């Protein structure tokens, strides 16, 4: 099988003039898998971007802003209107009060909010605890900051929080907990009991909590997103991150934000002013408008995604790839050992040729040295129904057993 001769995807020590900081981090698996999808004509159920556009009303607001002179630097904190809209959103959705002058900062996507939080809060040698498998920028940015990432694993098949493992992971060097709920890639939405356990660990050890809530609105029937900042004792230690991308199917806009105590927001701003300083000036008025005028849209997206989740999960179940039904996000995770595979990367590299489909292996989304997740593969269902059906049809027609 030709694809098995491809070099394994491992951190390759890159030579030449690249810094050790960058050379130590492998390129993101998403670019590699999307390139594979493009070069083989495979159905891309890998990278998590929707294949339908966000609301045209919001796009029109951006066009209007481009035409009416919002084309110079926005303030480093973000435009006053957008900061106000973010503060109003936190209040209307969750009863959280934040001061738009000092407790909100607009960033280049949640990605820059993550970068700003880690660069602004973590000193060399500090430990960061994240839920594994984790979004890959957490590891890269913790390393850039000189920190040490410790994983607490959400284990298959149900991917729940092990509160004892979280408490045991805390050391004298722990600076912050980096939480993500709804959780990419497992689809877990942390419930109140799990959030209370996190809050107890944070309060008992006087830790900062950075919580990535970009899927806050993409939660399915029977589940509820509860922001960590709403729990007792948490508002004063929690930095909450989100963005327009996932909620409004505008992932290419890269307008995100961090909200929380002024001291933590100032730390993010302190780092981000030297990264982008500011970005998306003509998009910021449109995002402010979306938060104020299209509040119902993310909920209708969630209902629509729930049907696509069921289509994908039912289809994978029927193919002998049982999927835990995700409670939120764009993603379902399957264990491929049922088909005789031990290595998710090997499976995902073989899949375009065998079936004409691309998926993402979860290995690599764990702290160094962990073999957890070797047999787990992530499938994105934020795709049009016809695309999901075609992907399932191709998988059904292929030989998937190793
Ligand atoms: C997509 C995603 C992000 C990045 O958000 P942007 O606004 O596109 O930068 C951050 N965290 C998680 C968990 C994500 O899935």
Image (cartoon, grey):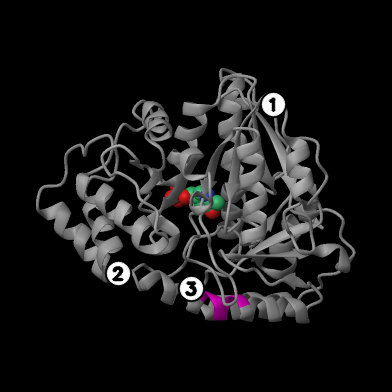
Name the foreground residue: 212 vs 50: 212
Query: Which label number is shown at residue 13?
Result: 1
Q: CA distance from mark 2 to mark 1?
A: 47 Å
Q: Residue at x 80, y 36 (%)?
A: 369
Label drawn at residue 130: none
* Label at residue 294: 2
Q: Are marks 3 and 2 in contact (CB under 8 Å)?
A: no
User: Crowding at label 3, few (<14), some or many (≥20) Cα neighbours within 10 Å?
Assistant: many
Please indicate, yes or no, whether residue 35 appears anywhere in the rendered image. yes
Which is more N-terminal, label 3 or label 1? 1
Question: Mark 3 and mark 1 in contact (Cβ < 8 Å)?
Answer: no
Q: SS of the residue at dot 2? A: loop
Comparing marks 1 and 3, which lies closer to the viewer? 3
Residue ID at (53%, 52%): 231
Give x and y (percent) for residue 316.
Answer: 73, 76
Between 51 and 101, the residue placed more toward the observer is 101
Magenta range: 305-309
Mark 3 — residue? 302
**251 relative to 313 in the view: left or right:** left
The residue drawn where x is 38% and y is 49% is 254
Residue 137 percent coordinates (x, y): 56, 40
Quadrant containing the N terminus in the rendered view = bottom right
Q: Nearer the viewer, mark 2 or mark 1?
A: 2
SS of the residue at dot 3?
helix
Q: Quadrant of residue 347?
A: bottom right
- State yes or no: Cβ of the residue under disc 2 lies below 8 Å from any atom of ligand 1: no
Quadrant of the drawing holding the C terminus = bottom right
């Amino acid at each position: 099988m030709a694809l098995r001769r491809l070099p394994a995807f491992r951190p390759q020590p890159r030579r030449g003039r690249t810094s050790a900081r960058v050379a130590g981090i492998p390129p993101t698996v998403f670019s590699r898998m999307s390139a594979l999808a493009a070069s083989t004509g495979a159905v891309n159920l890998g990278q998590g971007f929707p294949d339908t556009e966000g609301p045209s009303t919001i796009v029109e607001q951006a066009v209007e802003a481009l035409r009416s002179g919002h084309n110079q630097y926005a303030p480093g904190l973000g435009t006053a209107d957008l900061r106000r809209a973010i503060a109003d959103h936190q209040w209307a959705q969750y009863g959280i009060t934040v001061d738009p002058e000092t407790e909100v900062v607009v960033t280049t996507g949640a990605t820059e909010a993550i970068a700003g939080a880690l660069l602004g809060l973590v000193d060399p040698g500090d430990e960061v605890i994240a839920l594994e498998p984790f979004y890959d920028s957490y590891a890269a940015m913790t390393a850039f900051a000189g920190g040490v990432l410790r994983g607490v694993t959400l284990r298959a098949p149900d991917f729940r929080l092990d509160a004892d493992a979280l408490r045991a992971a805390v050391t004298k060097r722990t600076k912050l907990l980096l939480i993500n709920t709804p959780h990419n890639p497992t689809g877990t939405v942390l419930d109140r009991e799990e959030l209370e356990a996190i809050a107890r660990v944070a309060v008992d050890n006087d830790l900062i909590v950075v919580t990535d809530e970009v899927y806050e609105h993409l939660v399915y029937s029977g589940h509820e997103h509860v922001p960590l900042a709403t729990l007792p004792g948490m508002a004063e230690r929690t930095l909450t991150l989100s963005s327009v991308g996932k909620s409004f199917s505008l992932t290419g806009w890269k307008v995100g934000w961090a909200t929380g105590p002024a001291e933590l927001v100032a730390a993010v701003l302190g780092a981000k002013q030297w990264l982008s300083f500011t970005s998306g000036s003509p998009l910021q008025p449109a995002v402010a408008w979306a938060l104020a005028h299209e509040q119902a849209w993310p909920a209708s997206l969630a209902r629509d995604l729930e049907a696509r989740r069921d289509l994908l999960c039912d289809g994978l179940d029927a193919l002998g790839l049982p999927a835990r039904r995700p409670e939120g996000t764009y993603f379902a995770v399957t264990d491929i050992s049922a088909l005789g595979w031990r290595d998710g990367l090997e499976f995902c590299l073989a899949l375009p040729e065998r079936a004409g489909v691309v998926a993402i292996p979860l290995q690599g989304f764990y702290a160094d040295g962990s073999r957890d997740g070797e047999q787990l593969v992530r499938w994105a269902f934020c795709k049009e129904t016809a695309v999901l059906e075609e992907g399932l049809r191709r998988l059904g027609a292929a030989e998937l057993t190793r």
